[in-house]
Image (cartoon, rainbow, N blue to C red):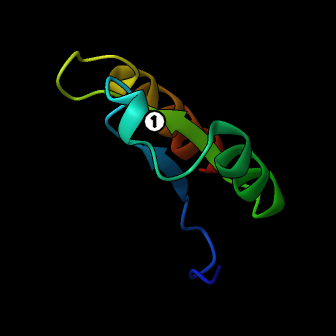
Amino acid sequence: LEAPEGVILALVGNKKDLPDRRKVTYEEATRFAQANKLSYFETSAKEGTGVSDIFTTLAGDIHNAM
């Protein structure tokens, strides 16, 4: 992955509420995120799960980078 210096990236898997339609396993996504030094989140916008975790974590990462 390439991004300008100082850019904070995260990997987000959405539709956690539909596990039977999953295309990428949790393990695959976690390995990819770790290999690329990314935070990984699984979310369900429909259920509202995990969404606030993304913003809280990224806001902390941005604050710590300053």
Q: How many numbered dots are placed on residues in this image?
A: 1
- In the image, is 12 to the left or to the right of 2? left
Image coordinates for residue 26, horizontal then vertical, percent: 64, 38
Residue matched to label 1? 59
Image coordinates for residue 33, horizontal then vertical, percent: 70, 53
Image coordinates for residue 18, horizontal then vertical, percent: 32, 29
Establish if 56 lies above or below 28.
above
Image coordinates for residue 10, horizontal then vertical, percent: 54, 52
- Residue kind at label 1, given as amino acid type: Ala
Establish if 12 lies above or below 26.
below
Residue sitting at x 54%, y 59%: 9
**Local SS, label 1:** helix
Residue sitting at x 40%, y 22%: 50
- In the image, is 20 to the left or to the right of 64? left
Determine which quarter of the picture holds residue 3.
bottom right
| Quarter placement of the N terminus | bottom right
Seen from the viewer's position, the closer of residues 53 and 28 is: 28
Residue sitting at x 63%, y 77%: 5
Single out the residue that lies furthest toward the left.
46
Establish if 60 lies above or below 23.
above
Seen from the viewer's position, the closer of residues 1 and 64 is: 1
Establish if 28 lies above or below 48.
below
Query: How many neighbours does mark 1 have within 10 angstroms: few (below 14), some (14-19), or many (20 or more)?
Result: few
Seen from the viewer's position, the closer of residues 40 and 44 is: 44
Residue sitting at x 47%, y 52%: 23
